[in-house]
Image: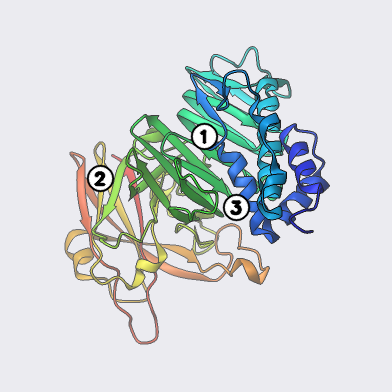
Amino acid sequence: MSASDPSFPRLVQAVLDGTATPEQHAQLADLLRANPDLRSAYVHQMRLDALLHFKGGVVTTPTVPGRDPIRRFRPSTLPPRVALAAAVVVLLTFVTLWWSRRGVDVEIVRAAGIVAKDWPAGSTVRLTHLSLPQGRVEFRLPSGIWLQVVAPAELQFVNAMHVRVSLGQVTADVGDRGKGFVVDTAQTKIVDLGTRFGVAVPNASHTDVVVFQGEVEVFDRNSPHASDAPLTRLVEGEAVRVDARRQMSRIMNVTSGPRDAAWSTHGGASGAVITSVHDNLRDPTELYYYRILAGGLHEDAPAFVAKRHEWNGLDAAGIPAELLGADLVQTVPSDRDNTALEIVVTVARPAVIYVLADSRTEAPTWLVQNFSNTGALIGLENAPLLASGKPVGRGPGEGNMAPFAVWKRALPNGGSVRLGPPGVATGEIRPWMYGIAAQAL
């Protein structure tokens, strides 16, 4: 399709008003992937910065007293390419104004807290704004996108493909139909490329963006041009904090429950024993985070961020009993080669810190001096690449397993412990990055 194909504005309007079929969603996604001009027009409309201004929660457009800005627009006086782009923007602006007054019909998946009684699962609610002082709610947009909102939260639904967050935590699972979904805040605008990601706005000072799967583009909220490059592109296992000056910084750790039920960039979520993990990394281009899974060490637990590798029992006996239910830190697999690595783990109360180290190579000096070897072993499954089509092994002893020794150190008063780099290669064996776990005493 060309940039002048009239199906583009019709497809966008169908998506905005929630009537688009799966086939129309797919057609629009194909157009956006194939045509940079249409992507620019689409992002321009979603941003609404040039032609829409939100004042006190009311949608307005720049106007001249007594005149209608849409009727005054004359695209025929412009070059054909510019006229087409301008006409598309005007059409999308009109559609957005109409939609903003109508609201978005959302399907309630689950609700807890203050809205649970009025919003039973399976019900449909029309929303233009969501003010949630307490609890959480999960719902599905007409575009098929799943959202979870955690209080306290304030959201505005621009349309079925665009949500504005002024306060609170939002997790989005977009899938293929929702590519191009936009979340914006006071500091930034996140354009989804088909993924699962989270946005947290604890106050007016900053926005946290965390990618759990796939990738997103992060733009300057006040960028005036649709063609401007993003501030960064984040992939699975990466996270950034964008401050009021649009400056980005790495988020060191993300804490969640074992099944992603809740997450936090400030530690202490889900009753975790481990409150923080940080390292001595100085490269500003490295944006990966450590994932702290509260109570997350069990069979088939993910070992690393952005990898399919898993922790399992080496045989049918399963994972050593003292490790089951421990907090688990997903470390970064590429750190297996970082000979200058230092990681500091902090616990909130008396606890035992475990290091799961590749037993096929000699243990590093720092580990021998500061930890004791329990004699127990746990298995790391070297999972096949996703592109191979081969499944990951399930349960103890399944898959291509490497033995890891279990080392431990007690911190009877809580506090912090410093860890060093992994062991060095022994012969042809290149050790994997170690794992970290903790159990309360």
> Disc 2 on helix, strand or loop?
strand
Question: CA–CA distance between discs 3 and 2?
Answer: 35 Å
Residue kind at label 3, given as amino acid type:
Leu
N-terminal of the pair, mark 3 or mark 2, is: 3
Q: Is residue 233 above or below residue 130?
A: below
Percent position of residue 65, x then y: 57, 19
Q: Is residue 24 above or below residue 186?
A: below
N-terminal of the pair, mark 3 or mark 1, is: 1
Task: Find disc 2 in the rendering and name its residue.
Answer: 346
Q: Is residue 366 above or below residue 425?
A: above
Q: Is residue 224 visible?
A: yes
* Residue drawn at 61 percent across, 16 percent down: 116
Question: CA–CA distance between discs 3 and 1?
Answer: 17 Å
Residue kind at label 1, given as amino acid type:
Val
Residue kind at label 2, given as amino acid type:
Thr
> Disc 1 on helix, strand or loop?
strand
Q: Is residue 426 above or below residue 91?
A: below
Task: Find disc 1 in the rendering and name its residue.
Answer: 170
Disc number lying in front (3 or 1)? 3
Question: In the image, 176: left or right of 284?
Answer: right
Percent position of residue 363, x then y: 27, 71
> Disc 3 on helix, strand or loop?
loop
Task: Find disc 3 in the rendering and name its residue.
Answer: 193
Percent position of residue 309, x then y: 51, 63
Q: Residue furthest front?
A: 77
Question: CA–CA distance between discs 2 and 1?
Answer: 27 Å
**Foreground: 62 or 224?**
62
Q: Say if mark 2 contacts mark 1, CB within 8 Å.
A: no
